[in-house]
Image (cartoon, rainbow, N blue to C red):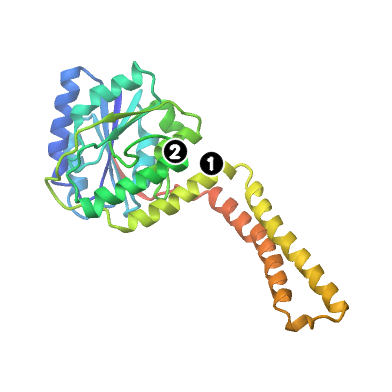
Amino acid sequence: MDISIVVPSYNEAESLPHLAEWIDRVMKEHGFSYEVIIVDDGSNDGTWQAAEKLHSENHAYRGIKFRRNYGKSAALNTGFAAAQGDVVITMDADLQDSPDEVPELYRMIKEDGYDLVSGWKKKRYDSKIAKNIPSKLFNWTTRKMSGIYLHDFNCGLKAYRHDVVKSIEVYGEMHRYIPVIAKWAGFSKIGEKVVQHRKREFGVTKFGMNRFINGYLDLMSIMFMSKFGKQPMHFFGAVGSISGLFGLISLVVVVIMRLSGRIALTNSVWFYLSMLFLVLGVMLFLAGFIGELVCRNSSTRNQYLIEKEI
């Protein structure tokens, strides 16, 4: 199969029929063999009914329905697991991503040899204050921290080599950083393509301002795991050692000063500071180190309740 198109959908019943018609036209014009995987992320409108109707009309359409809303990362991760195509394309269901971009994205993967090609919505039709300005700040920070020079990390329109989607894991809110995750996994040939951005025709945006706060927290998590995921003690041990060593030296100095009669031990602020740094050192070794390992190796991190599947 040439192409798998993964479409995360949340309350997009009105958009899906129009998107499917557009996808079908593009696929037939270029002679691609394809499948479209619609992942219903716990919608409460007629999104699943629309997916079932599309499947009844064209068996190239497949559907996965979550029992509740898990978020875009969960939908993408589940769609990636189900995808069978040589090239996997992701696009949002809201008609703001153009299926006309698919043939060139496919060519860049198959002929130019890219592992991943990310769309760049150079001209956007979103609110400048609510989306454009925060997105530019977010993308600038991600470029500086990751060393990947993309203009639009969070563009929903991306193309992947089959091996990439089968080798990466997306959870939490990590869908914003898939290029970073792919680079971490060893897929370093990452390209970019200017793509058309369209105004939303139906429904309302599903993203609030809290995504930027969560986005930066997730970026910190990814950068930590990429550097210290295999050797977390290199981080916690270093910081904990510095804190513990400072606390121990301070305690020795305080005890010497007490033995010489220059201070009263329990009345000295330095005594309590030394104990604080000693405790912090131990906490960094125990709480932080164990907490990160438990989170990273959780067997239920990517388990989602699927209600139906077609």
The residue at which mark 1 appears reads as 226
- 167 lies left or right of 126: right
Disc 2 marks which amino acid? Val
The picture quadrant where one finds residue 21 is: top left
- Give the residue displayed 25% in from the left and 22% down from the top: 104
- 78 lies left or right of 63: right
For label 2, count other residues whose C-alpha is less than 10 Å away and answer few (under 14), some (14-19) or many (20+): many
Vertical order, 133 against 230 (above or below): below
Q: Nearer the viewer, residue 143 or 193?
A: 143
Residue 97: image location, x then y, percent:
21, 37
What's the CA distance linking mark 1 and mark 2?
9 Å
**Which label belongs to residue 180?**
2
For label 1, count other residues whose C-alpha is less than 10 Å away and answer few (under 14), some (14-19) or many (20+): some
The picture quadrant where one finds residue 169 is: top left
Disc 1 marks which amino acid? Ser
Tag 1 and tag 2, C-beta contact below 8 Å: yes
Vertical order, 11 against 276 (above or below): above
- Give the residue displayed 17% in from the left and 36% down from the top: 54
Label 1 element class: helix
Vertical order, 296 against 79 (above or below): below
Q: How many marks?
A: 2
- 173 lies left or right of 123: right
Residue 248: image location, x then y, percent:
77, 64
